[in-house]
Image (tube, rainbow, N blue to C red):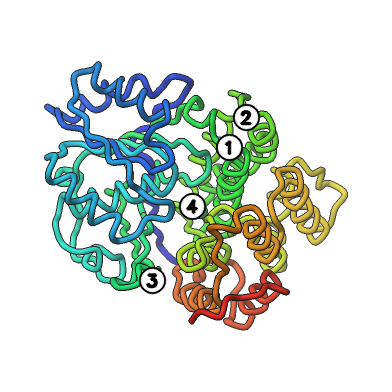
Amino acid sequence: MSVNVYDRFPNCLVVGEGAVKTIGDHIRKFGEIKRVAVITDQGLKSLPIVTDLIDILRAQGFEVSLFGDVRSLPTDRNVLELVEKMKDFGAEAVVAIGGGSAMDCARAANALYSYGGTLEEHNISRQKYSYSRNVLKPCFAVPTTAGTGCEVAAGCGIIKTDPITGEGVDFYIVSAKQMIPDVSIIDPLMSISLNPATTAATGMDALTHAYESMVSLNDFPLAAGLSLEAIYLVLQNLRAAVTGGGDIRARENMAIAATTATVSFQLCKLGLVHAISEGLSAFALIPHGVANAILLPQVMEFNAPCVPDKMVRVAAAMGINTFELSEQQAAARAVEEVKSLMRDIEMPFTFTEYLNQREKEQPEIFRPISRKAVDMSLKLAMESSFIQTNPRTAAVEDIEAMLDKQFAGYRFSADN
Ligand SMILES: [Fe+2]
């Protein structure tokens, strides 16, 4: 019998409509803090959800500096620039508002700002530091997308770029339980203006977290309860959040589903979907939630023979009546339910479909991806720790076959 440690729990969740207005009270619990760095991404920095938050902080007596240059899928350059700006400002606390990119970039920058060192030295494979919450600057997370769950995550992913070309060549992961934000503010009003496509993609990310933690080899009953509840909440609310963006109840339930699913995967880890999608996001710039959604049905089918009893519970959490079904039928129905959800929220079903659609919509800025980007993703997947907690062993040929199917008919660029 093995002995496992489950220690990655959220520190403080502040949940409900208007919760963000209380942020100053929570910052003050961490002592005499004056200078607060607000970190967000380029698309959000001028929107009212960010400017209102800054107004709230200033009205409560804080000196605020806005760092609004986080790009989608943050890079090492992005983190290093942020660290320099935090030094110039003398930041005493960090408020990350946005999706996973802003929260990951802010938390990685906070580690370097508080401890010094390079991203290489903070990378999980050769982590030089043992973090202390007394040294890390207090971190407050305000998610605006219901999906990534980075507001309660210990790890953050940063793309390593080639210093000359700026292209992604590898992936840093900075991770420790002390990196979990000190306070996570889950306010449905923050995601009310999120567009349907991003709502759909981040919601599918939450569903993937819930499924992968549920079937993980590192499973744990306490986490299984969280995963199943998150699956239920996503199936009950994602359609309404996508099609009726202003539905506050659906937004709140999706925000809670996202947080709940991430708490579960912090304990149990993830699986094959995330092992493969990490590289596709880093090297082919496919949004994380979209990459996960496309891979999810296929990985569910691949894993099903190894987790028949769990698939019955997953199917039941989706609202399927499993009483008259065999384990195999329940698993098949669960996969169909995911596909039905994807159809309703207009998610693509293959990478070829997604990339061709993007090229059609934005021909002036779209750049076709190279075969090399897929090969690098395959290599990263085989090195991912998530592959070890996937319930079915995946050989390189299995992943190759999945990628071949998802990229069937795609015309790769000639770039190497
Ligand atoms: Fe994810």
Q: Does ligand 1 reach within 8 Å of label 4's beta carbon?
A: yes
Q: CA distance from mark 3 to mark 2?
A: 36 Å
Query: In the picture, residue 356 is in which quadrant?
Result: bottom right
Q: CA distance from mark 1 to mark 4?
A: 26 Å
User: Which residue is depicted at the point 31% across and 59% down?
Assistant: 174
Cβ atoms under marks 1 and 4 closer than 8 Å: no
Mark 4, secondary structure of its residue = helix
Q: Residues within 10 Å of mark 1 (few under 14, many from 20)?
A: some
Frontmost of labels 4 and 3 is 3
Q: CA distance from mark 1 to mark 3?
A: 30 Å
Residue at the extreme front: 364
Tell me the number on the disc at residue 94.
none
Q: CA distance from mark 4 to mark 3?
A: 23 Å
User: Which residue is depicted at the point 21% across and 67% down?
Assistant: 121
Q: Amino acid at mark 1?
A: Asn
Cβ atoms under marks 1 and 3 closer than 8 Å: no
| Between discs 3 and 2, the one toward the N terminus | 3
Q: Which residue in the structure is indicated by mark 1?
A: 195
| Between discs 2 and 4, the one toward the N terminus | 2
Q: Amino acid at mark 2?
A: Gly
